[in-house]
Structures are given as structure tokens and as C-alpha cells.
Amino acid sequence: MLRKVFLAATLALVACGKPAAVQTPDLDSPYPAQQGGTLVDAMSGEPSGLIAMLAGESAASAIASNIFNSLLKYDKNLELEGELATSWEVSKDQKTISFHLKPDMKWADGKPLTSADVLFTWKLVTDEKTRTPYGADYKLVQKAEAPDPLTFRVTYAQPYAPALDSWAGLHILPRHLLEGQDINTTAFARHPVGSHYYQLDEWKNGERIALKRNPNATQGQARIDRLVSRFIPDAAAQFLELMADNIDSMNLSPIQYARIFPARPELTQKIAQYKELGNAYTYLGFNLKHKPWNDKRVRLAINYAIDKQELIDGVLLGLGEPIASPYKPGTRWSNPDLKPYAYDPAKAKQLLKEAGFEDHDGDGILDRDGKPLSFEILTNQNPQRVMSAVLIQRRLKDIGIDVKIRQLEWASFIGRYIKTGDFDVVVLGWSLGLEPDQFNIWHSSQQDPGKFNFIGYNNPTVDKLLEQGRLELNPDKRMKIYHQFAQQLYDDSPIVYLYAGYGLPAIHKRVKGIDNPAPPAGIGHNSYEWYIPEPLRRTEISDK
Amino acid sequence: MMRYLAKRLFWMVPLLVGISLISFLIMHLAPGDITTTEAGFNPKASEESRQKLRKLYHLDEPLIVQYGLWLKRMAILDFGESFASHQRPVLWEKKDEKGEVTKGLIQEALPVTLLINVVSLILTLIISIPLGILAAKYRNLWQDRSITVLIFVGFSIPGFWLSLLLMYWLGVVYNVFPISGMHSINYQYLTAPHKIYDTTHHLFLPIIIPSLTGLAGFTLFVKNGMLDVLHQDYITTARAKGLPENIVLGRHALRNALLPLITIIGLSIPGLIGGSVISETIFSIPGMGKLFYDAVLMRDFPVIMGILTIGAALTLIGNLLADIAYAWADPRVRRGVGQ
């Protein structure tokens, strides 16, 4: 008897654990836009908190940007437009910016959102006690004021062009909840109240964060009711979850995108693949303070000797683009006249010969003054960078350069080698914002330990252009400055641009309303318009 | 006995301080600190701001001063807060002025890891003891041979590979087990019995896989222990006086054969709290292994030190408990201790 009861109980449990067998509705036919549903995605890391100015990791800003607004934002073509602000003006002397806020905005808890909150956020981010690494841009503001609830005005000592971008990157926080609290330890970081499309519903440590629609959102209502981000650190596990329909979206690796998907029709049937150019590129950087990298001919020779298309085909399986300037191709800052250096080993040998490198002793390796041309490429444990280094090693061997490769754990790499300048050549990447100012990376004043011009680039023309670019707020005039800057870098070749890889999101076809192909801002730019038609939703138990 | 205990406990203190000092020094041998890892390569993060952070965390002080600061807090059992921007307490929950409770990192991760490892260990014992007895009883017969082959197959299969394979078969193809995580996403809306079922269902694979791969050691241990005992004179006596084989094996042989197992279990206590980075990463389980690994990559010194200290303390206590249990189970040892 007891055994029978147990058996029945087990069966009952098993039965309710399994999803009911439903007929799969047609995923490809058109559906009208509809409110509701849950979108589940996967993240490899967990945010440490949801105040983006304190939390450094990308997971935090990804989730926080669904909860908080900034004054400005980038539209689908990466031009600035108002978010909390309806409009903004720059004064004649280009030193003062006035933002006009939208009227009648509310926080998720119903309290009014005004310029006082903006002023409060500015005070927070510039406060010495705030543990943020991102205060520098805002400290340049000499005077910030909120003359009336709908106006916020900042005055800089001198015109500062990156200012506008900085106001698109600062999440405005509610004064009424944070005033008088220690921002570094406040529980608000784990119980945020914002003004954007979503608000926090549940945060299960180590497992997931669930957001629900914010009825008081300042930008209108999103169509999807709930966003759940599951923390799944292992990429293979994420992929299995995607196959089993337990998550709706993840970022694919090139292998998953170009090899596994095409081989599995059951995946392509239900999951759509997208491709968007990210804001990052991978490069080979020289330590310009060391010989022979101070010789432009040697740098150019290496640039000619590396086959970038081979890297893109081999490492990214074709899912990337060669670049010729440090800006995303297709945006206004990227100089369209520059073309990537071609693969030309003969020219590389020629240039090396001019620089004095020849195989004098006949050992197959070029040498100068009895010293062979041999160096070590350092990189971190990023498989794509390591594979790139291996392909480069082989191409350079073809022209008689001996290359060794060393891969290091990230913190050791930065702490032990980059900060001390103890390296010859590195393979690294820059992941940049949308602001064209790259003063911190290329200006000759930024070479101290811990600063970002660690390759030691020093070009007075570039310095001048970077300084001009910071002072010019007119986008068209600015564009010309950065085109000239990119031209200088191109001629000097202080680094070899290797490639800019695509981001490869895969999203279940139940999610509709996604722009394909992706506009410059990527597919996420209109995620509030995405919707999941009712017949296609998962069977969900909701709180309603 | 009490004096012995007191002595052992007393000696644990300098031992722990020594362990913590060595851990502290080794940890600081690795280049980089939290400011290199958190916003280290973001051009928007200025070096001045990072210096400011370093100062706030006392990372600009000499090592010995930093260790002193840490030891001072440890004296009142204050493990401090994580360097990560959430600044959560390392060990135990804290209440702020508004009554909001922030849970400690170890407080949350340890029960998860303990649950998985203890259940897994019990499962291993439940399977391996009978297997070991069988293998000893039918030594060199086909039963023994097939058991040996089976446990060695289990031993040789890499755990992560088996995990991925089972996740694919049972999770994707047959869809009978969840693939990763500890709870379903609608967990908060489930009723209590469903919640228990849901967690059990999720933890099935993470528990069963280390049990399978861990079988070999314990089975062989039991088998060899049994074989040793079966050669003893008192077993021959038992058989000679006509006891049934079951009683010979079960009552006389097994008890003595299991004695060394106590030591082995004592030795596995550090493993119980350590957790496995690989298995926790694959199954997305927020346990101790992942916590420690991430802390090391982040150079989150208070968390690293907290876990190492707790680990060291529990290991020492585990060893002590194993010794006590052994003395309790084996009169020969007990008398040896008394002298």
C-alpha cells in the first residue's frame, strides 16, 4: 500500500515537472504586436550591484540600463538624442550646456523626477568618498545648477566635447531614496528604484535577476512584461539551455554561429541568428620605447606581413571586419578613405631591409648588428587572441622573424607587464564607447604607469588633434578632426589593427519586432518594441 | 581525554595564524589588485580614481600593515567586506540602519556546496560499501572483475565531459532533467512541495556525477579492508564454529574493515566545503568553488582570505573529529591516547 502511494506521488511529481505537450505554433508567420510575456536570457557573470557608476562589470551596466535613464542616449544610427531631456543647448562660448527635462516624469515609486535628482547624481559621482573609477569626466564641470525643476545646467572651465557623451552614460539616481546614505554600501544597489522601462522584481544571488515592467516609465511602456537574466557562466551550458528552449537568447561564439547552427536544422527552425558590429577591436601593439619598434619601417613591415583576412577567416570564421581606424566602420568618426594595409610579404621584407634587417648569418632569421629579430607576443587567456597570435607567429616566420607567444592571466598581465612597460609586443583589444575622444589612449601625456598610452605613442600632431577634438562641440567639425587623427595613426602604424569582430546574438523566433539587419546601434536599440505573441509564449506560472 | 582535546584545540590557534600569514603572503605575490581587475582597462576610469580606491582599501600600505589590519579584525571574528562593489560581508549577514539584511557570501555559498557534497558522499558510501563487500566476497570471480572494470570506467571518465553529455541527453534530447541552475525561473510562484521537488530535480545531475566518478576510491578501500580482515584468525574461527557466511561478513568482518574509512571521511572534509569550480561552472551553481575562483581572478583579498581561513579551520576541526571518532570506534587507539 505504502509503496503504491509513493509511486503515485512520484508519478504526480514527474508529471507536473514536465511541460505539457503542446502543438508547436508556426514561428515564422506574422503576428500582431502584443503586450506581455517573459524573455529569458543568459549572462555569464553576475552584477555586483546595479549602480553602474560603482559596479565596473558589463553585466551590471547591461541590467542597470534597463532600470535607469540618462539625460541623453544614442539613437539607432548612433546620434545623440534626448532621453530624460527633451532638448539641450550649448552656449555660444561652448562652455555651458543646458538640458531641458521632460515634464511630469516619475520614479518607479511614483515620486517626481526633476533636475534636483540630476544635480544630486552629479554630486554623487564627483564626491571624493564615492568609490567610482568614472568620476573624471564629471569633475571637469565647474558649476552645476538646477535653476528650476525642468532645467539642469553645467558649466565647464573650457569647452569639453566629450561632455555630451558623458551625460549619455550617467544613470540618474533618485535623490529622495539616496540622500544622506553612504552610496558605497547602500542597500539601494541591490534594491534599485529607477525610471526606465523595467524595475527589479527579484534578485536570486548566483542564479538570476528578474525585472518587471515599470508602469511609471518615463519613456513609455515596453511590450514585454518580464525580463529574466539567468547567470550561466559556462558557454556550453548556455548553448544547451538555448537548445532545450529554456532561454530565449544568448551571444554565440563564431563556431556556434557558423558551424553548429547550419548543421542543425532543428535549431535554425526556432532560433534566429543576428550579427552586429561591436565597439571593440583587437590589435597588435608595439612597445614604442623599445628597439626596433621605435622604427616606423619595422612596424609597417609587420603590418604588411600579417594577413588580416586570414585572421578573420581562421579565428572568427569570417565573422568580423578588417579596420583601418580606431572607430567602428560605418559610423561618422570612421575615416572612409582609409583602407586596411594589404598582405604583402615582399614589401615587408623590403622595409625590413631598409631598416637594416637581413639574414646575414644564414640561419633563416633576420638580424641587425648580430642580433636576431626575435620577440615575444604577450596576450591574456582569451582564445581568440591566442589563436590570432599563433597565426601571426606563422606569417612572421615566413619573412624570417622569430616569434614566441606567452599567455597570461589578466590581472598578472596588466599588473606585472603592462603597468611596468615590461613587454615588447602585445595582442590586446580596446572596447570603446561611442565618444570619439581617445585622448587617454593616444595622447603623449598619458604614458605614466597605469595610464592607457602604455605603448608610449608620442606624436605632436596627434596630441594637437586630440586636444582640438576635445574643444570642438560641432559634430561636423569634430568629424574632420578625428578623420585627420585616424590618418596620422594609419601612417604611423603604432599598432596593427587586426579585426573588429561581430557580436552574434541568437534569439528565439518567438520574439518579434527585432530589426534585421542590425542598425549601427545593434539589435538592442528598440528592445522595448520587441514582443512575444501569446500563442508563442512559454507555459508560465505568473503572479497574476 | 579532555586534556588531550584542550591541547589539540589550543595548538590550532598558532597553526591557523601561521596558515593565514602564508596564505596572505602568497596571495599578494600575484601581481595586480582589485583596481586592475575591476575597471582596469576601461579608458574612462582614470588612474587618479584608481589610486583613490587603492587608498580606501588600504592597498597602498605596506604588506605587514595590511596583514596586521586583517588580523586585528579577525581577532573579533570580523571577516570584513568584499572589495567588489557590492561590498557584501564575507562571512555572515549584516543589518544596516534601515534594517535591510545583507547576506554574507560564504553564508550563501557554503550550504549549497555542503548539501551537494554531503549528499554525494553519502551516495558514494551507500553504493561503494556493498560493492566493496561483493568484490571481496567474490574475489577474482566475474563479479569482482566486472565491479573493478565498472568503477575504473567511472574513475577514468572526466567529470566535466560526463556532465555535458548527460546535460545534453537528459536535458536536451529527452528533456527529463533541467540543464543548469538550482531552481526553475518560476520558483518563487511554486508551492512548498513543488519547491522541494524543483530543487531536487535540479541538483540530481550535479550530485550524481561526482558520486559516480568518486566510487572507485571508496570501493577499492572497502574491498581491500575486507580482504585484510578476511585473512584474520578470528574470521577463520567464526567460520569454523559454523556461523553463516552473511554473519561472518556482516558482523565480524565488516565492522573492522570499515574502521579505516573514518580516516578517509575525515580527510575528505576539506573537499566537502571546497566545492568544484568546474562542476559549479558547468551547472551554474553558486557554490564555494566558484566564489573562490572568481575572488582570485578579481583579487578580492578579503574573500580569498575568508575562504582560506574558514577552510583551514574546518580542516583542522575535521582532522580532530576524525581522530576522536577513530579513538571512540577503536579501543586500541583510545588506550594509546590515554597513556
Image: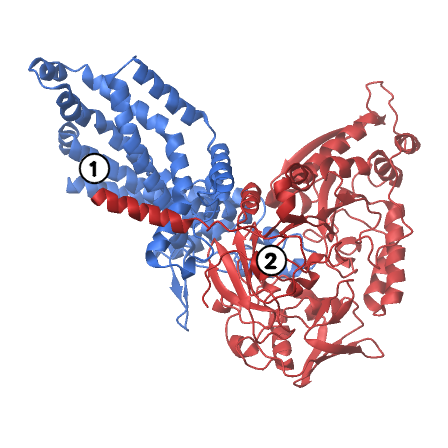
Judge from the rendering whether residue B202 lies leftward or rightward of residue A277; answer left or right: left
Q: Residue at x 65, y 65 (%)?
A: A33
- Closer-to-camera residue (A214/A364): A214
Residue A259, placed above or below residue A446: above
**Dot label at residue B324:** 1
Disc 2 marks a residue whose amino acid type is: Gly
Mark 1 surroundings: few (<14), some (14-19) or many (≥20) residues within 10 A: some
What residue did someone put label 2 on?
A56
Per the image, label 2 sits on a secondary structure element best described as: loop
Q: CA distance from mark 2 to mark 1?
A: 48 Å
Q: Quadrant of residue B332?
A: top left
**Dot label at residue A527:** none
Q: Percent from the top left, x then y, of residue A485?
A: 87, 55
Q: Percent from the top left, x then y, of residue B167?
A: 49, 39
Q: Residue at x 9, y 19 (%)?
A: B243
Number of callouts in the render?
2
